[in-house]
């Protein structure tokens, strides 16, 4: 428990402290956001972006401190670190790796001075490469390859597990990226999701007789660091945003979410916990399919948060209401997780 609290506190403090310095550094070098013409966000043009780098630094700091141990196994006072376990390192591969792809995407936008990043094929290739590394490491470590909801469902995916990992990491990274269109929308909702995963992974750690997952305490510490970092960044990213996370942040957060779901055996539960991101993604799919099939648009603009903006909702209204939706989805997901524990005989 102390490791989780330390990880969350340190990542929060590092992020909330470093972000103003990043704002100044990025502003001095004119590293700012380019705005789409379809939405009246021109007042945001030039707002510092690539703030996801600060989130990554905050998470790494919190994760490291979460492993700090002032006592030896014999109880002697000494400075040292607990073992860094494979599950935490795997999450870091997905988190930092996807963040690096997002960084290249942001860098491409800056060099082109347009709101267009990497070529879609190159971006997808990079995401697939990171997901493949995660899949290779996970299988080598011995993770459960059965499809899961709140627990494995008894359907072993075998070799298809690799493709399932690719789908989950790439889809989640892009889904969080789609939600990163309004001040604080992605960071606020991500903080809720990671907070839920803290509860889930720690609950699994406390009930090893019910859950056969590996390294759950390690995952709880990592989730706590992610929660603290996103909330620390939200302090400066809340409307009116002083800084944006950019693809660097959204891709990293999405990669971490998918990795944690895979390692906690809550694959399909992530669809509920991240229900807001599902809505955003589905709205884009519907919009594209309708326009290509019938030449019409279902929404004024996709992702759907822009639809409500164009209907006249103030930006802060859209953000807060979408945060509420994110909270409802998270509460439902936690309810389903605990309900399975009760009905499955977890309470004797």
Image (cartoon, rainbow, N blue to C red):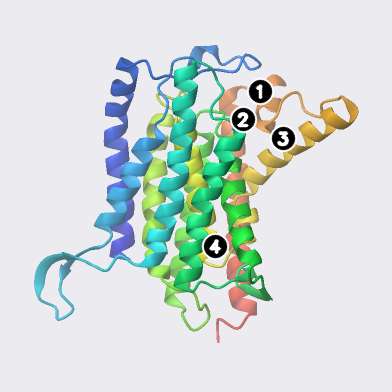
Q: Residues within 10 Å of mark 1 (few under 14, many from 20)?
A: many
Mark 4 vs mark 1: which is more N-terminal? 4
Q: Are marks 4 and 3 in contact (CB under 8 Å)?
A: no
Left or right of residue 312: residue 196 = left
Give the residue displayed 38% in from the left and 57% down from the top: 222
* Quarter occupied by residue 161: bottom right
Give the residue displayed 27% in from the left and 35% down from the top: 17
| Secondary structure of residue under mark 3 | helix
Cα–Cα gap, marks 4 and 3? 25 Å
Give the residue displayed 40% in from the left and 22% down from the top: 48
Cα–Cα gap, marks 4 and 2? 31 Å
Mark 2 vs mark 3: which is more N-terminal? 3
Mark 3 vs mark 1: which is more N-terminal? 3
Cα–Cα gap, marks 3 and 1? 15 Å
Q: Nearer the viewer, residue 197 or 322?
A: 197
Quick check: 213 above or below 275?
Answer: below
Cα–Cα gap, marks 4 and 1? 34 Å
Give the residue displayed 54% in from the left and 12% down from the top: 42
Q: Nearer the viewer, residue 340 or 129?
A: 129
State the residue lying farthest toward the right: 294
Q: Which residue is mark 4?
A: 262
Provide residue 217's location: percent of width, then percent of height.
38, 68
| Secondary structure of residue under mark 4 | helix
| Secondary structure of residue under mark 2 | helix
């Amino acid at each position: 428990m102390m490791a989780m609290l330390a990880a969350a506190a340190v990542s929060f403090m590092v992020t909330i402290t470093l972000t103003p310095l990043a704002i100044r550094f990025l502003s001095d070098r004119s590293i700012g956001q380019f705005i789409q013409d379809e939405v009246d966000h021109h007042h945001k043009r030039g707002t510092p972006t690539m703030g996801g780098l600060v989130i990554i630094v905050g998470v790494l700091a919190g994760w490291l401190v979460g492993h700090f141990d002032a006592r030896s196994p014999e109880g002697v006072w000494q400075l040292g670190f607990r073992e860094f376990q494979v599950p935490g390192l795997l999450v870091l591969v997905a988190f930092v790796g996807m963040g690096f792809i997002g960084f290249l995407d942001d860098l491409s936008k800056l060099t082109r001075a347009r709101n267009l990043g990497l070529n879609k094929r190159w971006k997808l290739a990079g995401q697939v490469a990171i997901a493949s590394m995660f899949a290779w490491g996970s299988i080598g470590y011995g993770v459960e390859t059965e499809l899961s909801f709140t627990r494995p469902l008894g359907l072993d995916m075998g070799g298809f597990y690799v493709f399932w990992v690719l789908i989950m990491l790439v889809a989640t990274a892009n889904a969080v990226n789609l939600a990163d269109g309004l001040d604080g929308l992605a960071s606020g909702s991500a903080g809720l999701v990671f907070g839920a995963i803290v509860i889930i992974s720690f609950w699994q750690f406390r009930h090893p007789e019910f859950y056969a997952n590996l390294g759950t305490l390690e995952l709880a510490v990592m989730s706590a660091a992610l929660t603290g970092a996103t909330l620390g960044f939200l302090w400066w990213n809340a409307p009116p945003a002083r800084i944006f996370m950019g693809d660097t942040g959204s891709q990293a957060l999405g990669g971490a979410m998918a990795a944690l779901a895979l390692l906690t055996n809550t694959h399909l539960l992530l669809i509920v916990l991240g229900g807001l991101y599902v809505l955003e993604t589905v709205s884009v799919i519907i919009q594209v399919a309708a326009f290509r099939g019938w030449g019409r648009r279902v929404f004024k603009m996709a992702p759907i948060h822009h639809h409500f903006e164009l209907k006249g909702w103030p930006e802060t209204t859209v953000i807060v209401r979408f945060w509420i939706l994110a909270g409802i989805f998270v509460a439902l997901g936690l309810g389903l997780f605990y309900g399975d524990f009760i009905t499955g005989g977890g309470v004797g």
